Image (cartoon, rainbow, N blue to C red):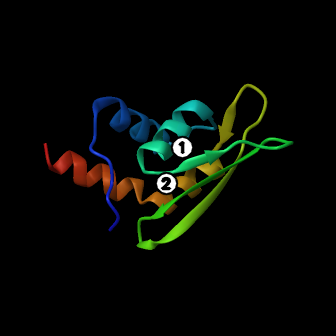
């Protein structure tokens, strides 16, 4: 598995909140999670879709692309949260971090 970030309290809290899969999630919190996992953001040139590039946790030699549409009020919808959680293996990461305590 790719190098994953250490788990400062705020990152763990953000991941826990994301894994509840709320109907709307704050884009800035999602962006901080992605950046903590080594992703860089490409803001939209036009429209509302942000593109993030970073390491694939399943195959570190591959780059992963995640596209997130951001709606009014800077919120991200549930299906995109599920996609991020699946691609970054967030449930496994959180479980591993909490076992280390």
The answer for how far apart the CA atoms under marks 1 and 2 are is 9 Å
Please report the residue visible at 71 percent of the width from the left and 42 percent of the height from the top: 43
Disc 2 residue crowd, few under 14, some 14–19, many 20+, Cα 10 Å: some
Question: Where does the image place residue 61, in percent across and percent down from the top left?
Answer: 44, 74
Farthest residue toward the left? 101
Q: Between residue 62 and residue 24, name the one nearer to us.
A: 62
Please report the residue visible at 68 percent of the width from the left and 33 percent of the height from the top: 75
Q: Between residue 40 and residue 91, name the one nearer to us.
A: 40
Mark 1 or 2: the one toward you: 2
Disc 1 residue crowd, few under 14, some 14–19, many 20+, Cα 10 Å: some
Under circle 1, the secondary element is loop
- Which quarter of the picture shows residue 93? bottom left
User: Residue 85, labelled with which disc?
Assistant: 2
Please give left or right for residue 96 compared with residue 93 in the image: left
Please give left or right for residue 69 compared with residue 10 in the image: right
- Which quarter of the picture shows residue 47? top right
Vertical side of 61 occupied by 76: above or below: above
Q: Between residue 79 and residue 2, name the one nearer to us.
A: 2
User: Residue 21, labelled with which disc?
Assistant: 1
Vertical side of 37 occupied by 57: above or below: below
Please report the residue visible at 62 percent of the width from the left and 57 percent of the height from the top: 66
Question: Where does the image place residue 101, in percent across and percent down from the top left?
Answer: 13, 42
Under circle 2, the secondary element is helix
| Residue 26 visible from this viewpoint | no
CB within 8 Å, label 1 to label 2: yes
Farthest residue toward the right? 46
- Which quarter of the picture shows residue 74? top right
Farthest residue toward the top? 73
């Amino acid at each position: 598995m790719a190098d994953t970030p250490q788990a400062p309290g705020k990152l763990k809290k953000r991941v826990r909140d994301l894994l509840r899969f709320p109907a709307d999630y704050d884009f800035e919190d999602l962006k901080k999670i992605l950046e903590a996992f080594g992703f860089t953001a490409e803001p939209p040139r036009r429209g509302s879709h942000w593109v993030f590039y970073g390491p694939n946790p399943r195959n570190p030699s591959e780059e992963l692309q995640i596209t997130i549409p951001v709606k009014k009020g800077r919120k991200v919808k549930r299906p995109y949260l599920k996609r991020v959680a699946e691609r970054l293996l967030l449930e496994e990461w959180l479980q591993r971090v909490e076992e280390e305590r």
